[in-house]
Amino acid sequence: MRIAGLVWIVAGASALIAAGCATYPDPAATRGIAEKMVSEAFTAPSPALLQRLEQDKAQQLCSKIGGAALTQEEAAEVVKLARASIQYPASGKLVGDWKVGNKLAHDGAGDRIQGGMLEKRKENGGLCQNCHALAPGEINVGNLGPSLTGYGRQRGNSEAIAKLTYERIYNGWAYVPCSNMPRRGAPRHPTPDQVAHLVAYLIDPPSPITAR
Amino acid sequence: MVTLQGFNRDDVVKRAISRPASDGSDVEALALYITSRSNGMKVNVTLRHQKEYDTFKAGEYLFHRRAGQTDFACIQCHGEANKRIRLQDLWNINDPKHIGEVASTWPAYRGAHFVVRTMQWRLYDCFWQMRLPELKYASDASIALTTYLQYRGNGAVIQVPGFKR
């Protein structure tokens, strides 16, 4: 049975070993086993918070193992769901206050669950800095996402760029299905108004991200 | 501990993750002592039993299962080379050296906490940052993820306690 590991590496989930030996469960069986584990493995202060574990349709489609590609139909469905999710601020203004956006972009806290309590804050952070380089000269920035330094300088601040930027923050899967970028607006975290502030931080000419 | 020594499981689990700068918990001490007996040996997770296969495959599934408001699974941060969250380097599951280190250096002394932490704590903390509910200590899901990671790290030489930031 030592060979089982090698078979897995070579043949993946289709590995079937001779009778009497253990075999990999099929994907549906694995899903059943794992989802039962998820349903039993977590605690939260309220049932509503426990629901965070439940996957929506897009998340299910975006959870392929080992980076397997989406089919064309699946990608189209993720894009369609993403497009349908996008909401705009009640004011209709897609470009808010860059100073507020600046603060949000550098705030990585809020809404975490620990010790049976939900982290309560007036306003949850935007988490941008965790993954993106922001204004020039900032050192404490992540690189999981692309650098945003000079974002507005390259693209300008036209209405079309404001709309594109807003939508890509609100639900980037409308443009790149299943990208690593969290759909920031989709579960209303941050809110449409906060997304507009982040847009301003990215494209408003006086913002440090854009200023020379 | 429960069957032979009469401990209450809930009490043990509740105290499993100790306070920072404390003397550590019973579970942390036991995990480190037991793992340290394998120091110098290679990680060698076998998948002989059907339950081991099932658990490994469940772990692989969970590693890729995106959920919550960050839309993160483990793979979003641990699937590419040379990635960071802020200044914190992230290990990459596709890099044999990285996954070997993951499999062979827990429990580890965590400098920022002044205590020894177990991989159970590491998993818990990731889910916390992902804005997901709290992972129960020694839950089946946590063991499935651990099985997946340890199997992927087979061959690495165990050296505990590890040292972490």
Image (spheres, coloured by chain):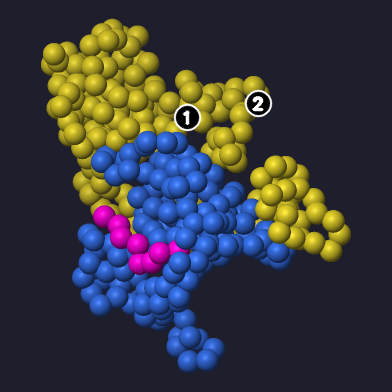
Q: Is residue B111 above or below residue B97?
A: below
Quarter occupied by residue A181:
top left
- Is residue B101 within the magenta segment? no
- Seen at 76% across and 44% down, the residue is A14
Of the chain colours in the picture, the one used for chain B is: blue
- Seen at 59% across and 49% down, the residue is B61
Pointer 1 chain = A
B143 sits to left or right of A183: right
Q: Can residue A115 be seen?
A: no
Q: CA distance from mark 2 to mark 1?
A: 15 Å
Mark 2 closeness class: few <14, some 14–19, many ≥20 residues within 10 Å: few
B93 sits to left or right of B21: right
Residue A71 disc label: 2
- Residue B62 coordinates in the image, percent (x, y): 55, 51
Please, what is the three-letter code of the amino acid marked with disc 2? Thr
Q: SS at mark 1?
A: loop
- Is residue B161 within the magenta segment? yes
- Chain coloured yellow here: A
Please, what is the three-letter code of the amino acid marked with disc 1? Ser
Mark 1 closeness class: few <14, some 14–19, many ≥20 residues within 10 Å: some
Quarter occupied by residue A46:
bottom left
On the same chain: label 2 and label 1? yes
Q: Main secondary structure of the magenta part?
A: loop
Camera-side residue: B158 or A83?
A: B158
- Residue A130 coordinates in the image, percent (x, y): 29, 38
Q: Which residues are magenta?
A: B158-165
